[in-house]
Amino acid sequence: MSALQPAPTLILGGFLITPEAYAPMAEAIAAATAQAAVVVPASRGDWLLTSWSLGWTRLLDRAETLLQELAADSPTGRVNLVGHSSGGVMLRLLLGDEPFAGRVYGHRAIVQSLVTLGSPHQAIRATALRQLVDQRYPGALFKQELAYLAMAGTIEREQLRPRARRLTARSYSAITNDPTSRGDGLVPLSSALLAGAEPLVLEGVGHGGWFAERWYGSAEVLPQWVPWLGGGDIGPGSSGPDLPP
């Protein structure tokens, strides 16, 4: 097994979150890897279309183009993928070989790792498209070919912004049938921790800036996981990521 090598990173954000929210994340990743870090352009209008497969392919086609460009400039020919929330679920389609809405992506040969941040991978009442992803490509299906890191935040109700507190129990119930689940204010632990992926639980971290002051992309939270992309430590006892040789 070998550690992750320096490689560019492609970031796909979450539902209704525009790219500028991920600028500090991209800067931190670029500094840690000494490689480019690029955010997939996505407007709120683009995200509103993701109730349909057309909306997914619009974003995935953009991601595919950027992925291929980054791979062409990568010292290893491979790229790290980072997906926040829905973006982490969608990026799993770039790895698989089965047709999706007339496309076949199948790009795992040029992907070094997939990192997901509070992504709702498993849910009792998932949308049809999210169910399709998990049925076709369950868990860390390709972990013999690339590295997986799945992150989940946990946060107390009083740490959430008041506007977010009204949503938490309803969201947890829809995903797990348990409104008292532990999670990041939107996605419970059991949903965000993709089976077979290296898990990382971040205490006191909310789903996004709308939910809490501290989220996966906050300046004080980024050092807890970004070093993984550079082959560094991410927590007590961690020795960094490994990949098949």
Image (cartoon, rainbow, N blue to C red):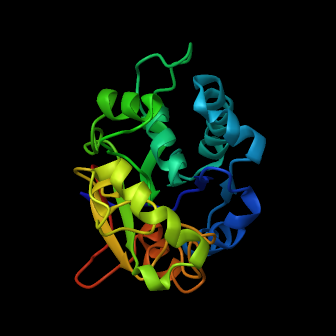
Q: Is residue 196 above or below residue 181?
A: above
Q: At 42% across and 57% down in the image, what residue appears?
A: 170
Q: Is residue 87 left or right of residue 26?
A: left
Q: Is residue 47 left or right of residue 215?
A: right
Q: Where is residue 122, by image quadrant?
A: top left
In the displayed structure, 75 sits above or below 59; it is below
Report whether residue 147 is seen.
no
**Drawn side of residue 168 relative to residue 26, left or right:** left
* Place of residue 226 in the rendered image (x, y in percent of width and height, measured from the top left): 49, 72
Dividing the picture into quadrants, the one containing residue 61 is: top right
Q: Quadrant of residue 23?
A: bottom right
Residue 92: x and y, percent? 43, 39
Q: Residue furthest top?
A: 102
Q: Report the residue at 75% width, 47% height from top.
A: 44
**x then y, percent, for residue 152:** 37, 66
Residue depicted at x 50% and y 72%:
165
Query: In terms of depth relative to the viewer, which is nearer, 149 or 184?
Result: 184
Q: Position of residue 184 (x, y in %)?
A: 43, 69
- Residue 201, above or below 104: below
- Pick the residue in front: 239 or 189: 189
Q: From where the camera sits, is residue 47 visible?
A: yes
Q: How many tags in the picture? A: 0
Q: Which quadrant, please, contains the N terminus?
A: bottom left
Which residue appears at 54% of the width and 47% of the height? 87
